[in-house]
Image (cartoon, rainbow, N blue to C red):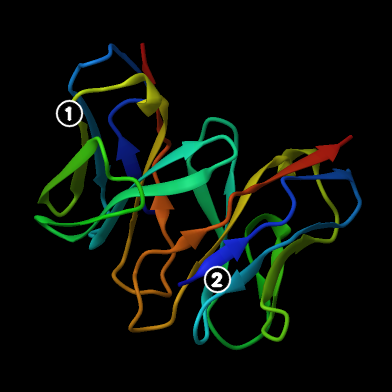
Amino acid sequence: DVKVTQSSRYLVKRTGEKVFLECVQDMDHENMFWYRQDPGLGLRLIYFSYDVKMKEKGDIPEGYSVSREKKERFSLILESASTNQTSMYLCASSLMTESYEQYFGPGTRLTVT
Amino acid sequence: AQSVAQPEDQVNVAEGNPLTVKCTYSVSGNPYLFWYVQYPNRGLQFLLKYITGDNLVKGSYGFEAEFNKSQTSFHLKKPSALVSDSALYFCAVRPPSGGSYIPTFGRGTSLIVHP
């Protein structure tokens, strides 16, 4: 059974703080994704990684960076948190096959005050 | 470029009645199509997918979806709705082999099943 875990379910940070969101998957998936979810906007892709140390920008990478040092772990970094980054953050993983579905973590609800 | 449309923000249905959540897509070639469900304060869960073959795909929790190539649609259906089916539903599309691994999601449809 595929499991994707995220380091926190709820997080409250202050404006300007550096924020780390961690995601770990246990199924040896090549692909990992970070999305943010906002009401009325659906899922928006922040970054995508298809291999260790490889990354691609998604639709909204500004203000974010990522790190993938190990295959199972994909971190999202907010260098200097701002209030407009208050959102639900979802991590997902999948095999490197277009027909394969994604598996999502439970999400981290981040509030920046 | 690929795109997905879920034309209804919200669908209301009475428990026991059939339900349909609509999805249309635009992609070059034969697509891979997916449905996911999201319960409150949870991540998305995979429901079903269309890859090839039979146009009617069966998935988890009694859901099924019908692929219609001529109408470029992939509507999610269930013969008899349950209150516990109330959730947010997302349709997603990936292009066929050789394209991007990155799926495109619809904006989601909130399904509300009334007792």
Disc 2 to disc 1, C-alpha distance? 35 Å
Is B95 situated above or below A46? below
Is residue B85 toward the left or the right of residue A39 in the image? right
Q: Position of residue B59 (x, y in %)?
A: 63, 65
Q: Is residue B95 left or right of residue B16?
A: left
Q: Is residue A110 among the parts visible in the rendering?
A: no
Q: Which residue is mark 1?
A: A79
- Three-letter code for the amino acid on which mark 2 is drawn: Leu
Residue receiving disc 2: B33
Q: Residue, x 63% and y 59% (percent of image)?
A: B60
Please state, as top left, top right, bottom left or bottom right, where the C terminus of chain B lies in the image.
top right
What amino acid type is highlighted by mark number 1? Glu
Give the vertical position of A72 relative to A105 (above or below).
below
Dots 2 and 1 on the same chain: no
Q: Secondary structure at mark 2?
A: strand
Local secondary structure at mark 1: loop
Locate residue B64: give its quadrant.
bottom right
Query: Residue at position x 43%, y 75% from top?
Result: A99
Subunit that carries the residue with mark 1: A
Query: Total of numbered circles in the picture?
Result: 2
User: Looking at the rendering, in which quadrant would you find the N terminus of chain B?
Assistant: bottom left
Q: Position of residue A75 (x, y in %)?
A: 20, 40
